[in-house]
Amino acid sequence: MSNLFTGLSAFPLTPLRDDTVDEASLSAMVERLCVAGVDSITALGSTGSYAYLDAEERSRVASVVVQQAGTTPVFVGVGALRTSQVLVNVWNAEKSGAKAVLLAPMTYQPLTEVEVFELFRAVTQSTDLPVIVYDNPGTTHFTFSVALYGRIAELPGVASIKIPAVSTEPEKARAHIEAIRAVIPDHVTIGVSGDASAATGLLAGCDAWYSVTGGTLPDIALAITRAAQQGRAADAYAQSERLAPLWDLFAECGSLRVIAAIAAHLGLAPNSCLPLPVRGLTNTQQTKVAAVVNELGLS
């Protein structure tokens, strides 16, 4: 089962048109990922705007992605503010045919480690699907300690931990990953996010890349992933360093807005495909994104 949670997991957008999920664009995006050969697809991650969709919309998105993905495994984000809402999303993910669920501890009132642990315990007790721990403090405003990783990873059904960006210094990245590895069972994989440090994370011992970029630009993300998996460190770093203008845009404007602009520029999604009140980039920023896409030959 742990092999399911390795390699490149692509996080596609959930494109909206007139405040409704654009199923045609979503299906085309998923088909593009399958043709490219990604190892898995994660629907309704932060790039998929899960927090802005109601349970019915999320259920429909999960079904569309699973149906279009064919034999490519699909993981589905189920995070919500209330445990009861999370469990409804888990049930809908099961019904869709998802292979695993991705759980972020969403917050309005700040959560304690005890509360987050109990959330994961409730989910693992309610489903036979594997659970991916989603540590994304930039959106959830909750930061996992290494000790909490260890406690949660001991729960039956926990299969992978998606960690935030690692240090770009290889030795620091390796030390951090080894510290996590020391407290989790052998079958639980570690996946890096924070695309600018993905090459470093993979080469430092991460098993997977949970990738914003891979959801819209799978070919370049796969090139980095495969180079790292094959031990071609120089190639992985070179591919990542070539994308420095893209990483700079992520840092300046936010990865979601940049990826939405890229998808629109490439004709993969409507303009203004994000859920209001989240708005896309300004015209000036869109022009800058288009220039980077063209300069790097991204498609």
Image: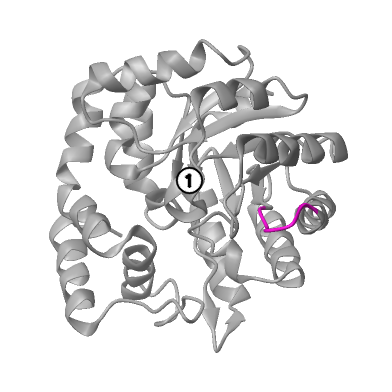
SS at circle 1: loop
Left or right, 154 with reference to 175: right
Quadrant of image for the C terminus: bottom left
Q: Nearer the viewer, residue 158 or 150?
A: 150
Examine the rendering and report whether any part of residue 214 can be seen.
yes
Examine the rendering and report whether any part of residue 232 can be seen.
no
Residue depicted at x 81% and y 39%: 122
The image quarter containing residue 268 is: bottom left
Rendered image coloring scheme: one colour
| Mark 1, residue position | 136
Residue depicted at x 75% and y 54%: 86
* Residue 34 x %, y %: 54, 50
Q: Amino acid at mark 1?
A: Asn
The stretch in magenta equals 79-83
* Residue 215 x %, y %: 45, 54
Q: Nearer the viewer, residue 163 or 295?
A: 163
Quadrant of image for the N terminus: top right
| Above/below status of 225 relative to 76 | above
* Residue 112 x %, y %: 61, 40
The image quarter containing residue 294 is: bottom left
Q: Nearer the viewer, residue 63 or 282?
A: 282
Residue depicted at x 84% and y 39%: 127
39 in magenta: no
| Above/below status of 282 relative to 296 | below
The image quarter containing residue 199 is: top left
Q: Main secondary structure of the magenta part?
A: loop
| Above/below status of 15 relative to 100 | below
How many discs mark residues in the rendered view? 1
Left or right, 214 with reference to 258: right
* Residue 116 x %, y %: 66, 40
Residue depicted at x 62% and y 47%: 105
